[in-house]
Amino acid sequence: MMMMSSRLSRWTPLFFVCALANLLAAEGLIVAGLTWPTQAISTPGTLVAVHLLTVGWLLLLMLGALFQFVPVITSKPLVSQRIALVTLVAVQGGLIGMICGFSRLGGESSVHAVALPTGGAAVLVGVLIASWNIGVPLLRARPMTLPGRMILTALAFLLVTVMLGLSFALALTVPALTPDLAPLLARVGDHALAGLGGWFTLAANGRQLQIADDVHARARGARHRG
Ligand code: HEM
């Protein structure tokens, strides 16, 4: 019992509550007609809704699930329960900054010049901490399973996605300081593909594969006992 409780992630329910709140906020924007398809793609409302769904909903949901799931499949604890909470605060706080920045994009205000890259940097910090927290038990597990490898690859795609996003944010808000980043804005398709195709799809399939393996192993065990 002691062993089991030390493996449970204390903050996973809070990750899920924040994820749900972000999903509801995105749905509110869609119902109010402030996003695509009522508005054009790449308008502030659409960018806010896209990131409420991708960072606020999918990323928090998946990280909350991985903090719970990785110690179970590796039989190794997370590096720290407390830094899982730091990840939540950095990603949720960073997302709020990104939303403030996106909503003022293209306007006269200088707020977005600070809020968008600062928010993106906070999300990057949260993701780096989460990658360390989850990556260490995955790398220490022997033998390294296919689901474990898929989750590690998914984390690499997540880092690429967030770093590209932060580069866009700098290119859009402080172009004079970061002229070399401007050509990257043409790579918005790669940003979306790395996030949805690389990070989210691989992480979700890694989890599903492990669950399917566990179900088969239990069924085999039950057949042998029977
Ligand atoms: C899992 C993480 C992420 C995913 C899946 C994701 C996905 C997307 C998608 C699908 C778009 C295109 C939206 C449209 O055209 O309306 C987009 C655009 C954008 N994203 Fe992200 N994003 C992520 C994280 C971030 C982060 C952390 C930042 C940092 C601030 C960021 C900054 C941007 C910017 C500035 C654009 C607009 C680029 C432009 O107008 O050319 N993204 N993102």
Image: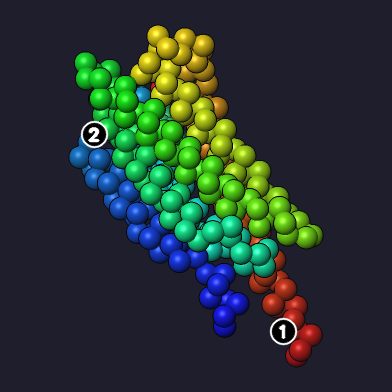
Q: Hey, what amino acid is under mark 1?
A: Ala
- For ligand 1, give the image quadrant: top left
Q: Which residue is mark 2?
A: 34
Question: Cβ(mark 2) to ligand 1 < 8 Å?
Answer: no
Helix, strand or loop at disc 1? helix
Quick check: can you spot residue 218?
A: yes
Residue at image point 24% right, 45% down: 28
Q: How many marks?
A: 2
* Label 2 packing within 10 angstroms: few (<14), some (14-19), many (20+): some
Is residue 138 shown above or below 196?
below
Does residue 178 appear left or right of residue 98 in this picture?
right
- Residue at the outermost bottom position: 226
The first of marks 1 and 2 along the sequence is 2
Q: State which quadrant residue 219 falls in.
A: bottom right
Q: Nearer the viewer, residue 115 or 62?
A: 115
Give how far apart the Cα atoms at labels 1 and 2 are.
53 Å
Helix, strand or loop at disc 2? loop
Residue at image point 53% right, 63% down: 68
Label for residue 222? 1
Measured as percent of width and height from the top left, residue 173 is found at 36, 18
Q: Hey, what amino acid is under mark 2?
A: Leu
Residue at image point 67% right, 55% down: 138
